[in-house]
Amino acid sequence: MEKYSAYRDAGTGIQPFLNPVPPTVSSLLATALLPFRYIIGALRIVLLLLVGILYLFLTEVVLYVFYPVPPLHKFISWAFTAVSARLALLVLGLWWIPVTYVARRRGRSVPMKEPWKPKAGDIIVSNWASWVEVLWLAFRFNPIFVLPSPVPVDQYSARANISQSNVTGRRTGTGSAAISSSVSRPPAVRVPIQGFHTVSLLKMICSTGLVPPFKGLVGDARPLKSIRKDATRPVVVFPECTTSNGRALLRFAQVFDESVPVKAFKVFVMCVRYDPPTLYTPTLTCSIPSYSAFNPLAHLFHVASSLSLALPQSLSIRLLYPAESPSSGSFLASDILAAGGYKDDLTEACSVLIGQLGKMRITGQAWEDKFAFLEFYRAKANR
């Protein structure tokens, strides 16, 4: 859309924030089936709510019985989370999610049988485009999820840049003048991440599409190193700090402050790829959140109203072999990072590796740009 061209990445030409839409093909059949889609969507949402209630009952009530026995408590916690997350995916039609192990360089001799088994205190790094990968990670690893907490934005000029970049249309002259001037809109000022909050699985799902600073976080933000050292499970980090539409990677925030290769813990790198939507298959990416407090219920209903009992394999998860991760002893930073110093080698290395895994381009847009985009998007929607 031309009115959102200001948020198209200048380097790649990709718009990473708008949700993908299916081809605009008129279909009488699709229109006739619309009432059935609403009925199916409502039934699936009811089942999904029942799964959520079951999960809360198991983890908030039943699980406390096993608290005095830590090993049993950990196992039961994983079992309850895995069953609930898998049931949620099944209800929504995701019967199977293909997982592929990928070597960065074909033909290179790497130990292919090394297990992808993150342990307590290890870090899982991934791109973020939907609540689907959150459920998949919960099902496979029962990890600790964290949300970033930036420094107060009023200490930086990001909001000033945002207010200036949103001036379009008649206030800048003609509509075409607004388009041409908005394309050259500079990226928002990078706001440092001061720490992280550990959050529940449901809070992580409800944060899909939102941008920092996230509301409803309890307590003070803690350094990632402190969270990792105290962790009893793997820790999942989404360095993009918000969801994209899956077409490209957002610019990673500097969240690790680590050199490579990492020696204190293991790093597991993964990438999630989503196919474009079709006339009968909705997009699974969720870049724009719901306006209500029940985010991402609107997107869940959109997916649940699909007429397919099992959604086509429109996504895939790609895991980098641990022998080629930034924590491997054989990892060479010079193979990944260009010459020159980086403030956060691990963040830059993960960004390049995820881009290579998913064959995705890396944009200059970041969560700060999406913050500006959502303000502009909501202002347009409210007119």
Image (spheres, rainbow, N blue to C red):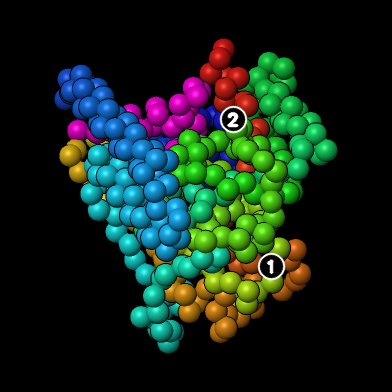
Q: Residue at 41% of width from left, 71% of height from top?
A: 116
Q: Residue at 37% of width from left, 70% of height from top?
A: 101
What residue occupies the far top of the structure in this picture? 383
Of circles 2 and 1, the one toward us is 1
The residue stretch that appears in magenta = 282-307
Q: Tag 1's secondary structure?
A: loop
Q: Residue at 50% of width from left, 33% of height from top?
A: 288
Please name whichever residue, 34 or 217, is drawn nearer the observer in this view of the structure.
217
Task: Quickly name the residue at label 2.
Answer: 374
Q: Position of residue 278 (x, y in %)?
A: 29, 38
What residue occupies the far bottom of the structure in this picture? 109
Based on the picture, tell me whether residue 299 belongs to the magenta stretch.
Answer: yes
Q: Position of residue 127 (x, y in %)?
A: 50, 53
Amino acid at pointer 1: Glu
Q: Residue at 63% of width from left, 26% of height from top?
A: 375
Q: Position of residue 54 (x, y in %)?
A: 32, 38
Labelled pair 2, 1 in contact (Cβ < 8 Å):
no
Please name whichever residue, 172 or 109, is drawn nearer the observer in this view of the structure.
109
| Disc 2 crowd, CA 10 A, few/some/many (<14, 14-19, 20+) | some
Question: In the drawing, does residue 375 fall left or right of residue 248?
Answer: right
Based on the picture, tell me whether residue 163 belongs to the magenta stretch.
Answer: no
Quarter of the image for residue 183 reads top right
Quarter of the image for residue 321 reads bottom left
Please name whichever residue, 316 or 72, is drawn nearer the observer in this view of the structure.
72
Q: Earlier in the sequence, mark 2 or mark 1?
A: 1
Say which quadrant the C terminus sits in: top right
Amino acid at pointer 2: Leu
> Quick check: 241 above or below 23?
below
Task: Quickly name the residue at label 1.
Answer: 258
